Image: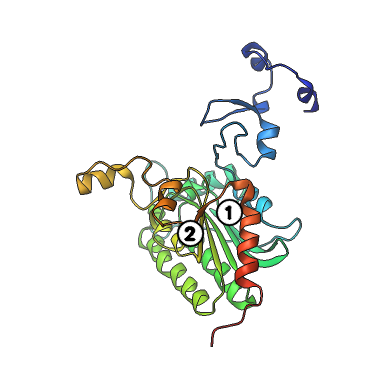
Amino acid sequence: MAWFKRQKTPLTAEGRRDLPRDVFDKCGGCGEILYRERFLRNFGVCPECRNHLRISAGRYVELLADPGSFEEANAGMTSADPLGFADRKPYPDRLEEARRKTGRNEAVVAGRCRIEGIPASLAVMDFAFIGGSMGSVVGEKIARAGRCALKEETPLVIVSASGGARMMEGAFSLMQMAKTSAVLARLHERALPYVSILTDPTTGGVTASYAMLGDFNLAEPGALIGFAGPRVIEETIKQALPPGFQSAEFLEEHGMVDSVVDRRELKSAVGQLLRHSWAGWKPRA
């Protein structure tokens, strides 16, 4: 790939057609054609307009965890089919398709790591796995990450990216909202910090549970964050919504998130929060 770094002038459309398809990406924000290698090094942030494209859970782990420090836990957990659910295709077939697409067993990866030298329990959702939907296994892995933080007396960091509860599991999915929230309440009682990072999109039952319960709620620029969609809300309240409604910037302006942070600065921001909130930690009486 080093050959294109020496190019002094932009490639023509004909020149781009002659190159392998995996050489270029197109920014959905400004439409700029970007060299994929540069784009990946920039963690999916367009260098021209700062548009944040979705990246995998593995890339977030690479971004946040100190090199070589991440130890995945419960990687083998997989969802069952408690309802025998099928729409256009059976639920087990959808799960298998998602596993092939992402190389993971579920829509969240969790484990222990260090973030700027600070031990932490880290869980990261992957929107590419059935829209990052929260089924029983996702909820259980999130809850176990919280219990690990409780047991080892370390902070908890969760990166959310989800369309909400997983409809194929019905009430089993909805119960994960209560389970994860209960674990976070125990962290709060112990004064152990929880940093929630909201990425595009963070919606539905995930927003209504652990995603918005952080001691510190950080969001990526332009992320869609909300419970119901704008159309549903407008039809319910019979009013037009203000511009930018449910964007990270709108929520920051209205006090729903603490800060909008460029993805490339997330590790530094999280590290700073953990140093101030966890260093010298003592359990509450």
Residue type for callout 1: Asn
Q: Which residue is mark 1?
A: 105
Q: Quadrant of the N terminus?
A: top right
Disc 1 from disc 2: Cα separation: 12 Å
How packed mark 1 is, by other alpha carbons closer than 10 Å (few <14, some 14-19, many 20 or more), is many
Question: Mark 1 or mark 2, which has the lower sequence index?
Answer: 2
Q: From this view, report whether residue 40 is shown above or below residue 121.
A: above
Q: Nearer the viewer, residue 226 or 81?
A: 226
Residue type for callout 2: Ala
Residue 74 visible in image: no
Q: How is the image coloured?
A: rainbow
Residue 267 visible in image: yes
> Which image quadrant is residue 276 in?
bottom right
Q: Nearer the viewer, residue 195 or 160?
A: 195
Give residue 82's position: percent from left, percent from top: 41, 60
In the drawing, what numbered circle is on residue 120? none
Residue placed at 41% from the left, 57% from the top?
255
How packed mark 2 is, by other alpha carbons closer than 10 Å (few <14, some 14-19, many 20 or more), is some
In the drawing, what numbered circle is on residue 80? 2
Give residue 120's position: percent from left, percent from top: 65, 66
* Kind of element beneath mark 2: loop
Give residue 23's position: percent from left, percent from top: 68, 26
Residue placed at 48% from the left, 59% from the top?
80
> Which image quadrant is residue 278 in?
bottom right
Q: Is residue 195 left or right of residue 9?
A: left
